Amino acid sequence: MRQRRPVTGLRISDSSAAVALSRLSTARSRDTPEGMVVDADVVPPGALPPEVSLRRVRMDEAMSVGSLVFHQHVLTPLVRDAEPFLTLHSFRTGAVTLGTVTYSSAVRVQTGSVRDAYQVNIPLDGSLRTMRGDRAITASPRLAAVYGLHRHGFEGLGGPQRILGVKIRREALERRLEQLLGRPARGAAIEFEFGMALEGARARDWYMVLQLLGRRLWGAAGLSADTVVTANLQDTLLTGLLLASRHSFSDELDQPAGPAAPRAVRRAVDAVEAHPDAALMTVPELARTAGVSVRALQAGFRQALETTPLAFLRERRLTHARRDLERAEPPTDSVARIAERWGFAHHGRFALDYRRRFGEHPSQTLRRA
């Protein structure tokens, strides 16, 4: 029996890439309460650890691991006598994979079939000619390429290329769509408009959530801090993409929904009031508890309570945070720790909302504890 060890991340540099990748294809793994445990030598395809880092690896290694993290693809250099090197840093959390990909020189990338995950690419600097089927656009930091489930490709327009890739599992995004619609999608794929301008109000908000999730994952604590904050950011990222982009269900989503009946609104409120932790529910979870669609619940809250489900949940979480600050035992408890306990990812915004709600800074409440 081989000795086993837990693996939380895969880091590959020039010297180890070939050996590490040769092991990727033959491993056996199992899941334990502590995380994924694999043979000490190997990691199997489809069971990569949550964090993957590659530093300046060559084309064959780049295609092998890059295909496991995102989609199967073929990589072709565009500069004669300049073999491109890939640097990649990715995290997978829940249904979402985020990764920054940098090519040292211009390349062309072409995927194979895409069936199980929706993909969005955003150039972080420069421009990127990107293709989907027989269409092409020039993506930029202001224009994201939304590929959906289509074969796609891209090529640089000169110099090193640095791209932020967002991959969302198909079943998760389509389930969220059904929660928004309040009906089954019956297996229909979401056909996204190719380009998504990141300058509109909704798209800016979506990109901000994406950046917050990225900072959460790339921070010092990394995935070990996978708390309710991260889960809420993932949830908002999926919902935001469906509302910020144009796609085959946008017209239906734009139609006003009839309000949920007062008894459904009361059912949602009672569920949150029954136990403090219920305030950590997402809006789709609250709608499911009430037995209505997200849009119906939103309309019902506006009609019955003159607020939104999100604002209601946020107010309850602020109240619970104040209770914890009043009972805190410094230095064990801190404002930041209590804010995160109640799902507030942005500490500055938490402090501002807290002051508006209670007339004092959270640190003042903590000092009186």
Image (spheres, grey):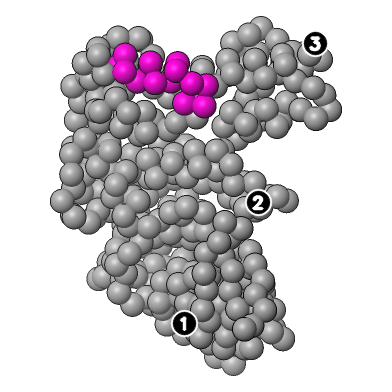
> Badge 3, how many Cα within 10 Å: few under 14, some, many 20+?
few
Rounded to the nearest angstrom, the CA distance separating label 2 from label 1 is: 33 Å
Q: Residue furthest bottom?
A: 81
> Position of 284 compared to 183: left or right?
right
Q: Amino acid at mark 3?
A: Arg
* Mark 3 vs 2, N-terminal side: 2
Frontmost residue, 316 versus 140: 316
Q: Determine contact: label 2, label 1, CB under 8 Å.
A: no
Q: In the current view of this chain or complex, which residue is farthest to the top?
A: 359
Q: Tell me the tag on residue 368.
A: 3
Q: Which residue appears at 73% of the width and 51% of the height?
A: 220
Label 2: element kind: helix
Q: Is label 1 in a helix, a strand or a loop?
A: strand
Q: Can you tell which mark lies on residue 101?
A: none
Q: Residue at x 32, y 57 (%)?
A: 170
- Residue named by callout 1: 75
> Residue tagged by mark 2?
224
> Could you tell which of marks 2 and 1 lies nearer the N-terminus?
1
Place of residue 69 in the rendered image (x, y in percent of width and height, measured from the top left): 49, 69
23 in relation to 175, above or below: below
Across and down, in percent, residue 105 comes to 58, 78
Cα–Cα gap, marks 3 and 2? 31 Å
